[in-house]
Amino acid sequence: METKIGVFLCNCGEAIKNIDFDAAVKEIAKFPGVTCVNLSSDLCLEEGKKKMISCIREENLERVVVAACSPEFHEHAFGEVLEKAGLNGRLLSMANIREQCSWAHDGDVTGKAVELVKMAVNRVRLLQPMEMKELPVNNEVLVVGGGFSAINTALQLSRVGLRTTLLEKEAALGTGTEELESLCGFDTSSMVSAVEADKNIKVLTSARVMEVDGKIGDFSVRIRQEGGEILRKYGAIVLATGHQTELALDCELKLGLSIVSQEEFCRMLGNPSLETEPKTIGFIFDFCDENSRFPTLATLNNALAAKRRWGSEVYVFYKSVKVDSEGAEILYQEARDCGVVFLKSEVPPRIDVDNGQVKIKAKDVFLGEDIILVCDVLVAEELHLPTEETANLSSLLNIRRDSRGFCQEENVHLYPVASEKKGIFFVGGCRGDLDLGRVLTDISSVVMNVYELLSSGKILVEAEKVEADPQKCVACLTCIRVCPHGAIQLVRINGGKEVAGISDLACYACGICAAICPAKAINFQSYRDEEILAQIEAI
Amino acid sequence: MRIMNGHIVAFCCEHSAYPAADSAGRLGLHYPENVRVIRVPCAGRVDLIHILKAFENGAAAVLVMGCEDGACHHITGNTRAKERVKYSEILLKEVNIDGGRVRMFNLSPNAPHKFVRAVNEMTRITKESGR
Amino acid sequence: MENKNVLVVGSGISGIASALELANAGVSVYLLDKEAVVGGRSASFCCKATDICSRCSACVVLGKVKEAVTHPRIKLLTNSTMKKLSGELGNFRVEIEQQPRYVDEERCIACGLCTEVCPVDPKAIYPPFAEATPFSYILDKGRCLRFKGERCDLCRTSCPTKAIEFDLKPKEQELRVDAIIVATGFDVFDAREKGSLGYGRYTNVLTGLDLEHVFTRDGYLRLPTNGREPQNIAFIQCVGSRDKDHEYCSQVCCKYAMKLAGLIKYQNPDARVTIFYIDLQTAGKGFAQFYEEYKESIRFVRGVPVEILQTVSGELEVRFEDISQGKVCRDTFDLVVLSVGISPGKNTWDLARILGINLADNGFFDKKDSLSCNETNVDGIFLAGTCQGPKDIPDSIAHGIAAASKTMRVLAESASQRRGH
């Protein structure tokens, strides 16, 4: 028996003048399966929707085509109308006869409108109903890292009631936060104590991730610690694997007392028993790495501290100050008001070591002349780089990194903290450049995203929206390799056969797998091959 | 009702080209009437069989439209689509359908002018090839 | 989180980001905006892609607007402002005043018949910009004859859905909410305040925001005076930022100027583009790969111009101090774009007074302390987006999500406290 299809046309308040609706209705009534064709002037308004519901019920319609304005905002609303009339909301197809027909062309477009309806009718005939299902998820979170971002993420996750494991490769939490501490004024040891006292947080130190399997709501993580390996399950994973710095110096120049990193300089500042307070200090930043903010902020803070603590003469060599962080411009002015001298150059300064003293030579753009500075201590330029952990984990999780090797592909739809895989997030320096304000915001964003996914212990999904037919699947693994969201795995079905299993939780319904499957084994509800080809054939 | 100039099938990604086409309509930007848009969740959903079927069915040209390079909601969808379009050009040459009749265009949802430009470009190509 | 309500004041990208997170977590959200259209300023920003996406994030805004507008737990209240606030966290009472829209957005089907019959020119009733949501027609009281005392009923009688009504008064309602997120956005610096730069006097001097709208509306750049394609364009950075009255960097201008310059050059490879700057802000996710390219194709001049004069032939002569040459120079251009900065919104003072929240020295809403990013001095009122300080689109989204996160926490804490009793 032919599926009963109802077609509802809207002439948009009779404002659509370039479609001959009477003629269109006559043509459409001839399409196979179409049992009723209705013309309305206000289909999207309450009155129009009520009439549609009555018609669906009276005519016992099994599928509905709405030929009106764009489905972009209305498909969802008309789906609800179908549900109210007792039909599954997915048994609807829309023909865009307004924005993409009447409004887009001059002259009579009746022919095109009728054809668009035919395309929708052909498609709707094949559509299958879809049900929603609730799938359980594990609501424990794994945070990989042990620095400021990792610790604070864990603390905030705990406060919203989620159990978290902090996994740190070093023997203790809070390693490597000294610089951030002295610049931003927080206390690592009290944060670490808060973590240790928190019943919702488990800490694993001297631990490394060896393998990760599974998907959102059900990650299996193999962890190696001293003395053995354990297997744990988590609902979401947050990478907080930080960044590292490398001095941008020629290899002949050696670090010593006269050439230091920002972190070492912080230690000098905090050392009450420092032998000699440096009288002249030079800072260099923003030549080799023009894409980081932290060097500016570190320099400004340290320069001010040096001025205030030791009264030293401080000279800063730079190309552009990066002040696009909150409070940076004020800090920059403070530094200048305090007597820090800023020397702008176009090219990196030359550094020489002469009799234990450091000599910096640069051309100042304002003076137009070379400046030579002999200083006691040079805080050299640092490059901000991703860590090895970031590289390892990205590879284990099979997630992409950006052009500089930091976490997170440079795709605007992922910002701020998401990866291309549901349930995997990034926070802090592992994403790239950081300043305190942005890190704090990112931490809260991650917590919100994870909470949204896991807090109720279940996620509502469209059941079997994209499914591999076990009869046709030959387990060639193509879809598994190609899925950008890591939503497909090999699963064993009854009978022992291994086939592609697409997770309803992790799938984003893009259809890339359906297109690439050589056996055409993947059914993508609403966008199956038959449904697309049926539209083509209508033209 | 028969269409004179030979129709153009445009597979439009729901994140980019489809809303751009809507915006074009709202702005009152006109383009040739022989375009038939088929909405897909990602340009990467478009398969060879769809492109070939469109030509078999009489299309004068086929457009595959997805997000800008680097902005695909599904990361690699638009790249896959591009590769598939290239491969389809090779296959189509074997049946004497060539001259740039199948093309990939990248655009954003707020770029209605790009949509119109793409459609106009393909219409020009089909007219020049005399179909 | 059923039975919890949150008011989000402002439906720009940050407010929408907050609203979506809360709604997805089960909270009911009122999304308020004083405009007739949601999406805030960034909804009308243009795509700056060349051969590849330039990561400006303008398209992200449209996707999120669509999600918010179709979300079952988000209720839109456009044309609305806050008048009074009382109560506290868990029990705020907010008085909202909704200005008459005259065109009911729930009944307007954008058929265009009203515009056809409107007798004035320019039309007093017209569609919003193409990507606007809701896409309902707008009545301009300033142009409408009816509001000038004349009897004109043409649009109302022509409307097929009876969506137009004139005799309307502002509607008041009281909302009871558990928490409030303030996401009222920013205003751009009014470039007329720097009179010597000629904005408002010379037609071919535009702001960065004007340029965004030109591309959104037209898709390409033409000189406002004669419609020809400009060949020689200048961008001037830090207009209304990093000065006595704005002691902050607006964070967005260097990048938007470079991306717009890139777009101009992509459309017209022979065009010459110059950017006058003080310090180039090139940090941030995804920018490094573009910066190398920009260094090749754009002429960067250290030194900010102080004066622009129009020559007899209609070109714009820019006088600036070229720092690397150490002298004052002059250069002529077809078009000058002033990269205006982000300033606190005009009604920030009123809002601060109504809400009882503090303003920072720079005029934006103040955070509670340096380690909080969204909390204000009032429990239960949070800040999201540029109303707290300059941010680009990704940072605004992050800040909005963070505000939702903080809000969730206090809602969860107050719920568990009540259960404990």
Image (spheres, coloured by chain):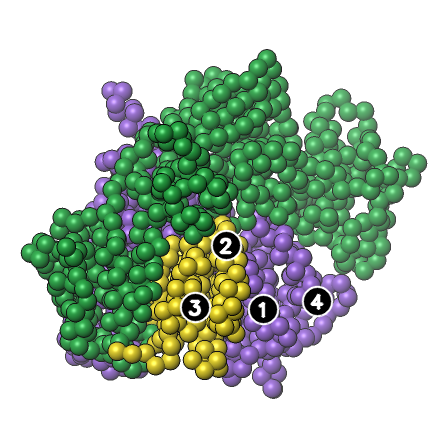
Chain colours: A green, B yellow, C purple
Residue at the disc numbered 4? C321
Q: Which label sits in the foreground, 2 or 4?
A: 2
State the CA–CA distance, disc 1 to disc 4: 29 Å
Q: Earlier in the sequence, mark 1 or mark 4?
A: 1
Which element carries disc 3, helix, strand or loop?
strand
> Who is closer to the viewer here, C34 or C366?
C34
Residue at the disc numbered 3? B62
Q: Chain of mark 1?
A: C
Q: Which label sits in the foreground, 3 or 4?
A: 3
Q: Amino acid at mark 1?
A: Tyr
Q: Classify residue A178 by image quadrant.
A: top right
What is the number of the mark on residue B80? 2
State the CA–CA distance, disc 2 to disc 4: 50 Å
Q: Chain of mark 3?
A: B
The answer to whether residue B62 is above or below residue B47 is: below
Which element carries disc 1, helix, strand or loop?
helix
Report the side of A92 relative to A521 (left or right).
left
Q: Residue furthest right?
A: A355
Q: Position of residue A66 (x, y in %)?
A: 21, 62
Which element carries disc 4, helix, strand or loop?
strand
Q: Position of residue A306 (x, y in %)?
A: 72, 35
Residue at the disc numbered 1? C266
Q: Which label sits in the foreground, 1 or 3?
A: 3
Which residue is at a point 79% across and 39% down the rendered structure image?
Answer: A378
Which residue is at a point 53% across and 65% down the rendered structure image?
Answer: B90
Q: Position of residue C199 (x, y in %)?
A: 52, 72
